[in-house]
Amino acid sequence: MIAWELLGEARTPEGTQMTLMRRGHEYMILADGKDLMSNNMKGSEEELARIGFARAKDIEEARVLVGGLGMGFTLRAALDFMPNDATIVVSELMPIVVEWNKGLLAPLTDHAVADKRTEIVQGDVKALLKKSVGGFDAIVLDVDNGPTAFTQASNSGLYDNAGLAMIRAALKPHGVVAVWSAWDDRKFEHRLRHHGFEPETVHVRARLKQGGRRHTIFVGRLPLPSPRKKA
């Protein structure tokens, strides 16, 4: 049995211990000892980008946001999915996570953070959203474990009424938001509808067709304008 090897660790501003571990070809990031993400369970993160950016894919020079870098799999999927003239902005709170993606984890995503279309913004995604009114064609959020946060308690403010109002303001009129979650959350679905989104809940496996845990992607689409009738 191959033992786990500690590759790096750091604390979040609220004191949660983040650790990067490796066992053979498997990498895992843990929060206070609880597994947060793994390169063996990346399917739902990749699906998050495909679902969230489906509408933006056909927009010329689209500008989209990935909230939460993690191990870089959502970013990698976005780069593979979006055209060459797109810009993928990534907001990541923890500097160490950016360092891991530039170094130890870089080969897992074919050096996604180094892609010319990638723009890394280090800091709280809420601060970026507040100053980006009408700035994004689509937003995908893989921050903490979804609307029920446990890594950083303040992350819950991203998904409450004030957070959704901020997200809507940061989107263009045709915008879409997609949120990764470890669990279902009926209240969050209702909250999306309350803020003018057309909500959809998608369930995907961590390894997609190969199985694994079942994860949830909440999708909120702003209504497209109705076509004008001919006079």
Image (spheres, rainbow, N blue to C red):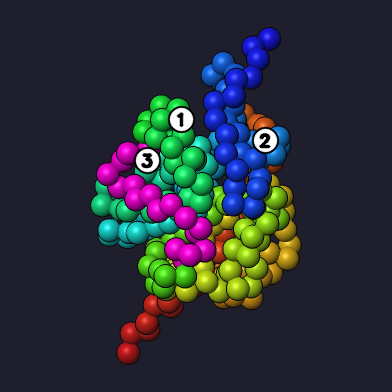
Residue at coordinates 54% horizontally, 26% vertically from top-left?
A: 7
Q: Residue furthest bottom?
A: 231
Q: State the separation of the CA atoms marked 2 and 3.
A: 23 Å
Kind of element beneath mark 1 = loop
Percent from the top left, x then y, of residue 59?
A: 32, 60
Q: Which residue is mark 2?
A: 35
Magenta extent: 112-129
Q: Give the label on residue 105, or none.
A: 1
Front residue (pair 222, 133): 133
Query: In the figure, 36 relative to 158: above or below?
Result: above
Q: Does residue 209 show up magenta in the picture?
A: no
Q: Give the label on residue 113, or none.
A: 3
Kind of element beneath mark 3 = helix
Front residue (pair 230, 160): 160
Kind of element beneath mark 2 = strand
Residue 40 visible, this angle: no
What's the amino acid at mark 1? Answer: Leu
Q: State the separation of the CA atoms marked 3 and 1.
A: 10 Å
Q: Would you call the spot at circle 1 few (<14 residues within 10 Å), some (14-19), or many (20 or more)?
A: many
Circle nearer the N terminus (3, 1) = 1
Circle nearer the N terminus (2, 1) = 2
What's the amino acid at mark 2? Answer: Asp
Percent from the top left, x then y, of residue 94?
A: 51, 46
Residue at coordinates 64% horizontally, 19% vertically from top-left?
A: 4
